[in-house]
Structures are given as structure tokens and as C-alpha cells.
């Protein structure tokens, strides 16, 4: 498939903003699934996803769409050409953001879906940054515009102020009524670049995900970055060096559809006869055996924040649980597993999860998909303990804490996070209370694109003790001294000497911060005319009057307009 007609994009959003529903509509629109296929959120295949109404696993589907793109055709310029679109639906919940970042590695663009009524939410921000850091083209989609409380303009303003996204780029949709959906795929084709990569380079393929299928064995989801892969090819893993034969290869359309080949830029599946579920390492690079390639960057390893012990409910079931966990971790590589024994519960496992929801979902999947019955121990975060013998250890299990009197605890550390909490101002109070209940320390506090609390003062200018209201300014207290000084200097330069002394002061309240004096003219303007002729005297008076037109008399002081202009230049 020609690479310039491939687009790989994902749908990212906060929970419930309509990613999976939008994915359904796009699959229907392209005829990939039938309208009214029965189940909404088609790509949410897991039972736990259906029950909880959340997406846990990223899912890929390939769609074909005819579109007339300038400069891109299938031989006939007047005919639209067929584009191959790979859509990756992603979870919104923070515990599953590793799924999002993995999916983005295979994409060049993302639809950033925002609920038109709720606006930008926590995971909108987090997912935006994941996509932004991966250099993806971001297409903002304001969804659910059918709702009575929808306020697309407010959302546009948020997109602009928080992400600097051009409001005119936003698409307005309702995945429910179908409104505006016709603009989504054209935007994907027009705005998102085709994958980079080259078909003529040696094969490099990123292992995105894998799962276990009863009949086919381990199924790997892959993104072909460079080159091409065919059925029957021999491939090797960069991580293990192990070689495999490609037994089946194809696309998710949306069910597995064999194609015999995957070309550079495509996302699809391969079956290689991998036996052990541990062989499919997420983030691994696969390449043709006997070629040398630079491995792809892969993924950052998941950071486990919650640990709990898992034991078979019936002690004899250890092997069954072991098997179930192996199968499931093949599908969820973000869980860390080590064997442990408990005097009370016998043989079991210590598992690390990304968060409590992740742990919950893992338990539920063990029971539902693998019929395992488990007892889990109280979850704990990892602590670090330093003992009197000088050793320092990470403790993921309270039972592992030393009770040896020669190894006393002399210091301990707990994990903390630096979090940015974005909330409507009416919730600030309760949220600060929640944070302090958890021993949170407030490092910084600011308003996004709103008024920020500041230290402002009114700077008065006084002429002969009288404040000139037109010259008063509001400035930050740190700048007041300097600005006051400059204003006074400027005024001194531009106000002419007059018949009397002029005192110019800058003051904050009653405190004078700068002062200048313009001394009185020693001679009267008319003094030299005394006894002179009347015409000359009148001319002189006339001239003075003219000058006065451009003067402003404040109290007894005449201020030339120029002085006011000069004041504007001080900041
Ligand atoms: P996800 O968590 O982002 O995948 O969101 P879902 O696609 O599961 O949708 C969450 C809920 O919003 C479901 O009940 C959908 O039926 C509903 N929904 C999705 N799109 C729209 C829409 O455009 N309008 C309305 N009114 N509801 C929608
Ligand atoms: Mg979803």
C-alpha cells in the first residue's frame, strides 16, 4: 500500500468525552462495521470494559476511505483515491496512560476529543501533552454538541489558552446524532502527514501490544516502521535474539483479516508461533533475521506505584493462578510480577500496578477471563528504608521490613508526586483541604489566563501638593520606585518654568517616593515690555494664549500636552 495514502491516528480524550463512540461512528462511516451492529463502543471488547464502560486496552482498527486529495490519486485525477486509515482508540483514565503513550508511538496524528459541555479536563491536558511531546498533529474535536449545555465557544477558548490550538481548526461533532462527523476523516487525511519510514529500507517493526488467543497463540500488534513483512518471512527480536517464522499476517479490519503482507507505515498483526507469553516484549524491535538494523527507541518502562500480594483462594490452585497471571500479563505488560510466600497464605505473587484502578481491573480480568479466584493483600506503595547496618532497600511488602535488632530502621522515605491540579476556582478550598489531609505541600498557585493575585499600588503624581488624577497609574509595587522617579524626571523636563516654584512629587498613599522642583521664573514675561509699545505687548500676550491652548492648567500649574505624551512612554 503506498505510504502517502496511509494515515495513522489515535483518539485521545478525558474519560467519557466520547472517544469510543466516535470510533464506532468512524468505523460505521467507512463501512468497517455495520450500522446498528448491536454493541456500542465496538472496540471495547473486554468484559471489564463493557461492565465499567471504560476503555482499558488501546485497540486498533484499519479502515478504508475514498477521498479526493489534491495531488494524490489512483491514476485518474478526477477520481477520489482510497486511503488506508489506522485508528487507535485509547483509554482515558490516568492509570492506563501507558497504553496511550504506546499507541501514540505508531501515530502521526491524534484527534483530541473534548466534551462540549464539560470542556477541558485533567486527562485532556495529560493526553494533549503526551501527543504534543510525540510531535503529533493534533486535531481538536469538540464532541457532544447536541447536549443542551454544550458551549463550544468556551471550549475553543480553552483550547486556545491552554494548548495554543487555533480555534478555527476545531471540528464540532456529535457522535450521538452524527452531526459534523463528515468533516472528521477529511481532516485526518488533509492535516495528518503520512507515516515517515521507507519501504525499500530493511524491515524494522515495533511491537505495540500482544495478547493470547486460544487457537492462534500469541498475537502481536505491530507497526511496520521501515521495509515490508510477508507471510513466511523469518524475523528476529532485538531484545532476545530469538528468531520466528511469520505464520499469519494481516490487519485488524476490525477483526483479524489476513493480507499476507504489511508494508512500511502500516499497523497490523502477526502470528509467529511464539510459545511463551513472555516472548512478546512490548516496545521490542522485530527485524528480518540476518539483517542488521538499529533498534527503535521502544517505550519507557512502566512505573509501578501500588503493590499488592495475590494468592490463590484455594492453596492448591497455585499452578492455575500462575498460568492465568502469565496469560494476562502478556496482554498487560505494565504489571510487574514476582513470586513470594506468605506464612499465612502460602505461595503467591507480589504484583506492581500503575494505580488502584489498574489493580482493580487486573483482578477483575483474572477472575472473568481466566477463572482464577484470588485473595489480594492490602495494597501498599513502595517505601525505602535505611537500616543501621548501612543498607538501603525498597520495601514493597510490609512483611519484608526487617525485625532484626541489628538492622534497625534509621531513616525512611515515601514516594511523592509533583502534581499540577487544574480546577474551577469554586473548588479550590476543598481541594486544598484534601491535599493538606494527605500532607501535600503547596508549591505554587496560579490562575490560567485569568486574573492573578498581585501586589499593586496606586502611584500618584502631585503638583504643588495637589494630586493630578490623569497622571495616576497602577503599578506593581516592585516597579513603583523606578516608575515614580522616571515620571517625575520627565515632568520636570517638559513643564516650563512658571511664575512660581513647582514641586513635582510621586507618591504612594502619603509616602513620597520621588521629588523634583522647578524653580520660579525670576522675570515676568512682560517685564521687558514695560514702557514699550502696546502692539508688541499685545502680540506677546496673544502668543502666550496660543501656547496655552496646548496647555492644561492643573490647579495653578500649566502642563504642556507634550508632558502627558511623554508620561505614556514610562512603564
Ligand atoms: P470514552 O470514555 O471517551 O470512550 O467515551 P464513550 O465513547 O464510552 O462515551 C461516554 C458516554 O457519552 C456514552 O454514554 C456515550 O453514549 C455518550 N456520548 C458519546 N458521544 C456523545 C455525543 O456526541 N452526544 C451525547 N449526548 N452523548 C455522547
Ligand atoms: Mg472509551
Image (spheres, grey):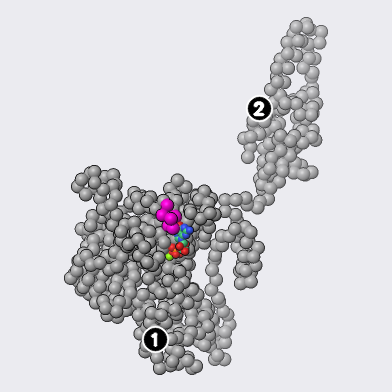
Quadrant location, the N terminus? bottom left
Q: Quadrant of ligand 2?
A: bottom left
- Indicate which disc residue 173 carries: none
User: Majority secondary structure of the magenta segment?
Assistant: loop
Kindly identify which residue carries mark 1.
Answer: 321
- Residue at 77 percent across and 44 percent down: it is 509
Lower sequence index among marks 2 and 1: 1
The span from disc 2 to disc 1 (Cα, nearest Å) is: 87 Å
Find residue 108 and report its horizontal and vertical position in percent. Answer: 35, 56
Find residue 92 and report its horizontal and vertical position in percent. Answer: 45, 65
Q: Residues within 10 Å of mark 1 (few under 14, many from 20)?
A: many
Find residue 379 and report its horizontal and vertical position in percent. Answer: 52, 80
Q: How many marks can you see?
A: 2
- Residue at 43 percent across and 55 percent down: it is 177
Q: Is residue 368 left or right of residue 116?
A: left
Q: Indicate yes or no: mark 1 CB to ligand 2 under 8 Å.
A: no
- Residue at 33 percent across and 51 percent down: it is 189
Q: Nearer the viewer, mark 2 or mark 1?
A: 1
Please say if 409 is above or below 133: below
In the image, is residue 193 part of the stretch drawn in magenta?
no
Q: Is residue 291 visible?
A: no
Quadrant location, the C terminus? top right
Kindly identify which residue carries mark 2.
Answer: 562
Find residue 24 and report its horizontal and vertical position in percent. Answer: 38, 61
Q: Is residue 218 visible?
A: yes
Please say if 521 is above or below 295: above
Looking at the rendered structure, the secondary structure element under dot 1 is helix
Residue range corresponding to the magenta coloring: 174-179
Looking at the rendered structure, the secondary structure element under dot 2 is helix
Q: Quadrant of residue 109?
A: bottom left
Amino acid at each position: 500500500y503506498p505510504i502517502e495514502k496511509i494515515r495513522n491516528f489515535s483518539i485521545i480524550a478525558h474519560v467519557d468525552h466520547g472517544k469510543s463512540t466516535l470510533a464506532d461512528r468512524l468505523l460505521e462511516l467507512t463501512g468497517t462495521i455495520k450500522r446498528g451492529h448491536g454493541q456500542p463502543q465496538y472496540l471495547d471488547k473486554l468484559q471489564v470494559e463493557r461492565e465499567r464502560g471504560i476503555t482499558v486496552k488501546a485497540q486498533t482498527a484499519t479502515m478504508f476511505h475514498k477521498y479526493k486529495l489534491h495531488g494524490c490519486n489512483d491514476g485518474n485525477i478526477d477520481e477520489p483515491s482510497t486511503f488506508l486509515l489506522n485508528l487507535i482508540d485509547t483509554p482515558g483514565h490516568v492509570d492506563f496512560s501507558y497504553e496511550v503513550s504506546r499507541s501514540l508511538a505508531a501515530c502521526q496524528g491524534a484527534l483530541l476529543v473534548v466534551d462540549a459541555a464539560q470542556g477541558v479536563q485533567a486527562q485532556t491536558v495529560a493526553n494533549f501533552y503526551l501527543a504534543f511531546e510525540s510531535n503529533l498533529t493534533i486535531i481538536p474535536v469538540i464532541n457532544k454538541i447536541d447536549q443542551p449545555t454544550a458551549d463550544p465557544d468556551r471550549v475553543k477558548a480553552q483550547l486556545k489558552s491552554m494548548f495554543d490550538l487555533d480555534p478555527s481548526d476545531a471540528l464540532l461533532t456529535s457522535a450521538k446524532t452524527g452531526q459534523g462527523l463528515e468533516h472528521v476523516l477529511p481532516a485526518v487525511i488533509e492535516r495528518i502527514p503520512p507515516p515517515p519510514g521507507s519501504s525499500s529500507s530493511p524491515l524494522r517493526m515495533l511491537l505495540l501490544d500482544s495478547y493470547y488467543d486460544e487457537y492462534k497463540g500469541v498475537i502481536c500488534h505491530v507497526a511496520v516502521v521501515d521495509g515490508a513483512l510477508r507471510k513466511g518471512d523469518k524475523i528476529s527480536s532485538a531484545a532476545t535474539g530469538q528468531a520466528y517464522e511469520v505464520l499469519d499476517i494481516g490487519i485488524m479490519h476490525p477483526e483479524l483479516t489476513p493480507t499476507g503482507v504489511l508494508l512500511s507505515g502500516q499497523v497490523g498483526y502477526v502470528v509467529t508461533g511464539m510459545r511463551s507469553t513472555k516472548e512478546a516484549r512490548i516496545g521490542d524491535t522485530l527485524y528480518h533475521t540476518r539483517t542488521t538494523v538499529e533498534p527503535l527507541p521502544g517505550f519507557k518502562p512502566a512505573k509501578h506505584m501500588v503493590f499488592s500480594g495475590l494468592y490463590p483462594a484455594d492453596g492448591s490452585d497455585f499452578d492455575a493462578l500462575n498460568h492465568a497471571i502469565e496469560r494476562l500479563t502478556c496482554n498487560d505488560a505494565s504489571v510487574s510480577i514476582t513470586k513470594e510466600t506468605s506464612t499465612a497464605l502460602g505461595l503467591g505473587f507480589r504484583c506492581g500496578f500503575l494505580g488502584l484502578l489498574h489493580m482493580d481491573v487486573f483482578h477483575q480480568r483474572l477472575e472473568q477471563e481466566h477463572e482464577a479466584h484470588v485473595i489480594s493483600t492490602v495494597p501498599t506503595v513502595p517505601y525505602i528504608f535505611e537500616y543501621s547496618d548501612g543498607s538501603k532497600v525498597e520495601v514493597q511488602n510490609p512483611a519484608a521490613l526487617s525485625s532484626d535488632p541489628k538492622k534497625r530502621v534509621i531513616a525512611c522515605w515515601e514516594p511523592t508526586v509533583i502534581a499540577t491540579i487544574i480546577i474551577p476556582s469554586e473548588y479550590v478550598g476543598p481541594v486544598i483541604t484534601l491535599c493538606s489531609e494527605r500532607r501535600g505541600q503547596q508549591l505554587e498557585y496560579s490562575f490560567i489566563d485569568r486574573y492573578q493575585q498581585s501586589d499593586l499600588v496606586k502611584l500618584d503624581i502631585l503638583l504643588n501638593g495637589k494630586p493630578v488624577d490623569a497622571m495616576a497609574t497602577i503599578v506593581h509595587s516592585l516597579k513603583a520606585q523606578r516608575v515614580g522617579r522616571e515620571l517625575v524626571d520627565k515632568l520636570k523636563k517638559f513643564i516650563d518654568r512658571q511664575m512660581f516654584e513647582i514641586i513635582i512629587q510621586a507618591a504612594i498613599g502619603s509616602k513620597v517616593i520621588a521629588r523634583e522642583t522647578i524653580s520660579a521664573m525670576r522675570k515676568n514675561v512682560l517685564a521687558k515690555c514695560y514702557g514699550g509699545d502696546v502692539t508688541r505687548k499685545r502680540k506677546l500676550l496673544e502668543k502666550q494664549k496660543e501656547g496655552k491652548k496646548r496647555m492644561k492648567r492643573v490647579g495653578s500649574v500649566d502642563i504642556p500636552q507634550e508632558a502627558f505624551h511623554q508620561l505614556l512612554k514610562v512603564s
